[in-house]
Image (tube, helix red, strand yellow):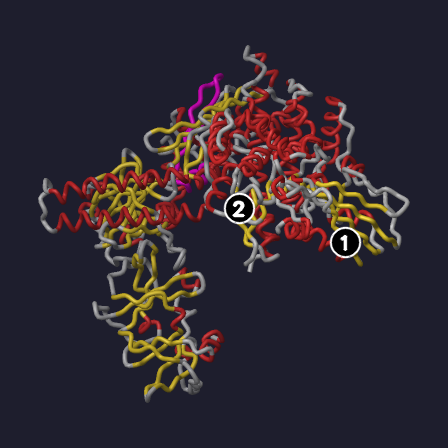
Amino acid sequence: MEDVVQSLSDGHELIAFRVGRQEFCINVMMVREIRGWTAATTLPRAPRYVKGVINLRGAVLPIIDLAIRLGMPGSEPTARNVIIVVQLSHRQVGILVDAVSDILAANGAVIQPLPDVTSDLVKSFVKGLLPMDGRMVSLIALDRVLPPEELEAA
Amino acid sequence: MEDPLAAIRVTFFQECEEQLSELESGLIAMENGTAESETVNAVFRAVHSMKGGAGIFALDELVRFAHVFETALDKVRSGSLEATPPVVAIFLRAADILADLVRAARDGGAVDQARVADVVKAFDEIEGQKEIPGSHEEEMVADPSEAQDNVWEVTFTPYPALYAKANEAALLLRELNRLGETEIKLDTSLLPELLELDPEGAYLTWLITLKSDCEESDIRELFEFVEDDCRLEIGRSETEGFAPGTVITGDNGFKFEFFPPMEEEIEEETEVKVVEKKKEEAAPKPVEQALVHASAVQAMVTKAETANSVAPTIRVDLDRVDRMIDLVGELVINEAMLSQRVLEAGINRASGVAMALEELEHLTREIQDSVMAIRAQPVRSVFQRMPRLVREVAAMTGKQVRLVTEGEATEVDKTVIERIADPLTHMIRNAIDHGLESTESRIAAGKPAEGTVRLTAVHRSGRIVLEVADDGGGINRSRVRQKAVENGLILPDAQLSDEEIDNLIFLPGFSTAAKVSDISGRGVGMDVVRQSIQALGGRISISSRPGYGSTFTLSLPLTLAVLDGMVVSAHNHTLIIPLGAIMETLKPRAEDVFPLDGDLNMLALRGGYVPVVDVAHCLGYSVQHAEPEQSVALLVEGEGGARAVLLVDAIHGQRQVVIKSLEANYRAVPGIAAATVMGDGRVALIVDVDAVVQNAGAESNAHTAELNNLEISGGAA
Amino acid sequence: MSMTILTVDDSRAMRDMLRHSLVAAGFRVIQAEDGLHGLEVLAAEAPDVIVTDINMPRMDGFGFIQAVRQDEARRATPVLVLTTEVDVEKKNRAREAGATGWIVKPFDPVKLVDAIRRVAA
């Protein structure tokens, strides 16, 4: 998480996207590619938020439905949905979102902490709130979007 | 960030392994009398190169031993020592010790000093080599001067050769100035008139007076590169310090030496003569200067090629090759997608587009095969490790063994090579320890005292087949049977064919050794070998004739990057079942399916019962169980010979698929071995047959006895 | 402009070690695996100094140095021999072939760099 805060002060750009009615952003440096939704191959006994795997130029990439991951009701993806391919340490993962909304310059942005009432699930992903042109954008960390290893037995 | 030195160290040890196997194969060629003129050079170079590398890492023990070894090899190379069988035998022992030293240096641990001393002594005896490495160099480190505050007088006359070798007098003088206060005079008395001046000649002499507390060696060190290409006189008023051949040493064993002066080199002209003399072997005729280079190089290329009958090779990073394999995999997929689209568009098969596409498909496959071939390597590197193993096991068991290898040049994917070394080692050990009789028994049976173990490799129908055969007593079937009964693997009254009995040795935990031996051990028997072979998509079988010996046959895919698979569908999911695991396809009848307990069904098959696995249900794609009579059944065999019948909805044919890892970006998925990309660009999952079969086994845990019976009756593949 | 050094050695470990030492000293390093490869590299590159091994497959150091000295464009390039050979006869052969200097491994990186600086004009 410190990386994200650090890069904010470094003047890096953020990419903002919509999931349900909320708007989130991540450091643009993490993004490898943005592409339209293509049908994924379902994986056996995977958590519901793992939509399956797709072929990205020969690499097999897991697709995470961010809405379901964040505890929102998911919906069947359509051609209008977008997959943001992000680099998480040595892995590449596709994040399924509703739409990409903006590219934001992070210069001088003040990150506001989350209110205490936030659920633990959201707290484990959302690292702070950014006021942007009158919108509230949640700065999100993706390092935990993949299912933890202990889920493997499920 | 990785420590670069640690990485270089890793490289060094990798290279040592390559050189050790080069060394051993060369020595074995010398032993068999099949050595070529280049063999001795290659053997020498291998040891020499290890010594050089070991020096970087201050692996003194290794350097010392390699030096002794290298010196002996050099004598063979120069013809002053003949490579008689006893000499080569010592070389082979030395190679084994060198290998131990390398591994001890890499992994820690000590080497049996007595063995080292034995071999060093043997070297001494065969060639009277008494030199201790290092002493030679020590003697040459002569530094006669003593340290005193002094005024040095240095006379420096460069020869043309100094300039020809790209040295620069001015730079040397500047260096000299750093040692202390200098006064430099230039003697131009030998400088000719401009018209007579040879632009490449040397006419100047510098006279330098140096006030410094340095030693003579310090001054000489400055001129170390050029000492042979100039006249250098260093002296105090009363002493003459000229001492050609001085050696400069550094703290870390660094040594720099000037070549002794050569008389012919005073004139530029004679130097050319030297070059031309050398050229006789390289470039046959003196040609115009501009052409000399090209022709000489050409000649050297030719020479190098004839000296080395092996085709020229390049060394490429494995990463690059793998990247290329990935890309070609992509190309294959794209080509398949294109074909599918064209087909869907209803284009006539006889049209130009369809025919061009067919050509493209053909080319693509050819490219894929060629790229795969880059990763292919001869099994030689593994075979080369075996002579030593045989020597060791023979010594431990007190048996006389001859190893015969065939088909060393047979090629297979690098990954496969890396992973067959252990199973082969185990099988050869087993063949000597269990397969071959004792020398006395062999003589009593009228056989030659020396047993033979034959290791062969051959390509057969797209796979590599490896055989380990011994001419021992064959499998003692009554003992195997008795053992299996004792261990509860079969019922005492089980009816088994000879072949089935032989295959009992592959069952987990089976060991035929009458007593525990430190060579084969107990419990880690052929079941482990079978498992590792199956993990590679391979199969193992045995045939045995009492009194004549046993043959183990391994059949492996040529690569792990692609897999021959059966494309099936289960509950609208496309899946790949590895073809190697499929024994046969069946159309089950309802009356042959019997419920056992809970969800588990058994299928009656030729008098036995095999557990039925509904693939879609097993992978959680469907809650409902498929109706067996509306499904296609695949009889598969998993690890350890366990069988099951997999139910799928339909079979869509066979195809070769490029294996893609799921772990790279996700993680291992239970029941799934890997993924691949299909012609439509979508990912299809490759079923992990072992996991699925084991799952079926787990569900029927209560019926182990019956299952074991089934395994056995099906064991003879 | 930093100096370019061509290292010719069949041992990858030795090449890596040389590269490591020489790059640390600020040189640009190009590499070849044997004499022939060295000549191929020289067709496209003009190093300031060449450091070569002697015992190499395909074309050894002697052949390589000879070929370098016969090349009009490269004959002025200093060539240092880096080897474990201590044999006087080999040394003489290297000298005849036109080597600038002879260094016995294991080398001292500092001295090697120093040596390279001094032979490069």
Asked whether B272 or B241 is in front, the reply is B272
User: At which x and y percent is residue B353?
Assistant: 14, 45
Residue highlighted by disc 1: B184
Asked whether A74 or B328 is in front, the reply is B328
Give the letter of the chain under mark 2.
C
Give the letter of the chain under mark 1.
B
Asked whether B485 or B109 is in front, the reply is B109
Asked whether C102 or B276 is in front, the reply is B276
Q: Is residue B47 left or right of residue B607?
A: right
User: At which x and y percent is residue C94?
Assistant: 64, 35
| Residue type beneath disc 1 | Ile
Residue B183 lies in what quarter of the image? bottom right
Q: Residue at x 24, y 72 (%)?
A: A75
Residue B531 part of the magenta-drawn span? yes
Give yes or no for contact between labels 1 and 2 (Cβ–Cβ under 8 Å).
no
Dot 2: what SS? strand
Q: Which residues are magenta?
A: B530-553
The answer to whether residue B83 is seen in the rendering is: yes
User: At which x and y percent is residue B123?
Assistant: 72, 26
Q: Which mark is residue C31?
A: 2
In front: label 1 or label 2: 1
Q: Is residue C63 above or below residue B561?
A: above
From this viewpoint, which residue is outermost toward the right?
B238
From this viewpoint, which residue is outermost toward the bottom?
A134
Q: Residue at x 57, y 51 (%)?
A: C19
| Residue type beneath disc 2 | Gln
